[in-house]
Image (cartoon, grey):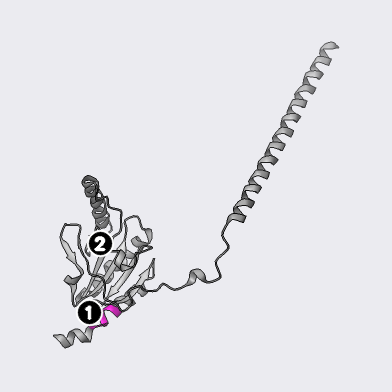
Amino acid sequence: MKRNYLVILVVLVALGLITWAGVANYRKRKQEEAKLKAIQSMLVRAAPSPAPAGADDAPFKNPLADKQAPAFTLKDTSGKKVSLSDYKGKAVVVDFWATWCAPCKIEIPWLEKLRDQYASQGLEVLGISEDDLDQDDQKALLKEKKEITDSAMKLGINYPVLFDEKKVAEPYGGVDALPTTFYVDRNGKVVAATIGLVDREEIEANIKKALGSGEQAQKGQS
């Protein structure tokens, strides 16, 4: 009989411990939920007020519209110096890109094909890499340039790829996002520019604009 009481007592104690543990766990979970809600409330209060509707929809303004494209001379992946002035009389697409830029990798095949398509009409594309370059460490610099060169080869880029060692992006407006592309006509004037990924049709339309703009002036000089 005593043994039965002992068994019942043990069972009751065990049930009590299980119940206590469940209550303690419930209270702890509720406390954590309360803390999480408090943190979320603080974040909401600290968050900036939403921008007015349509603020982010403002169209990109070409900082060099109808201005001469800033001159530059940079080295390509083979070490050759390439200047914008080398293409006087041609239409040039100046495309700022980077190996880590996913939208750039979508745009590049379009540029390759359009370059082939319009090369006979006087089009050239120059891809200026905005990848970080450690110019204070020659060994690191060589490695970085090799990585850019290898990436360009894998992408099948068929136009000159230049290293921006002279911060050419600055006179072009700073280039806040990639890709950023400028379309330069035969007289060296910027006739269009885009920021971020745009569709192939828009790129082609801008190329045609660059090819056509200044064409009559070039014919008059010949």
Q: Which residues are magenta?
A: 208-214
Left of 167 or right of it: where is 34? right
| Placement of 220 over or under 184, stated as above or below | below
Q: Quadrant of residue 101?
A: bottom left
Going 49% across and 71% down the picture, which residue do you hit? 57
Callout 2, which amino acid?
Ile
- The residue that label 1 is drawn on is 187
Q: Secondary structure at mark 1?
A: loop
**Which image quarter is the N terminus in?**
top right
The residue shown at (65%, 44%) is 35
Looking at the picture, which amino acid does disc 1 mark?
A: Asn
Image x and y of residue 51, in percent: 55, 66
Which label number is shown at residue 51? none
- Residue at 39% in and 74% down: 61
Which disc number belongs to residue 157?
A: 2
Foreground: disc 1 or disc 2: 1
- Nearer to us in this view, 172 or 82: 172
Residue 214 position, x and y percent, is 24, 83
Nearer to us in this view, 114 or 80 = 80
Label 1: few (<14), some (14–19) or many (≥20) C-alpha neighbours in 10 Å: some
Instruction: Tell me: residue 58, above or below residue 32.
Output: below
Image-based side of 13 in relation to 115, left or right: right
Q: Counting residues from the N terminus, which is met first, the one under dot 1 or under dot 2?
A: 2
Query: Residue 52 location, x and y as percent?
Result: 56, 69
Crowdedness of circle 2 by 10 Å Cα count: few (<14), some, many (20+)?
A: some
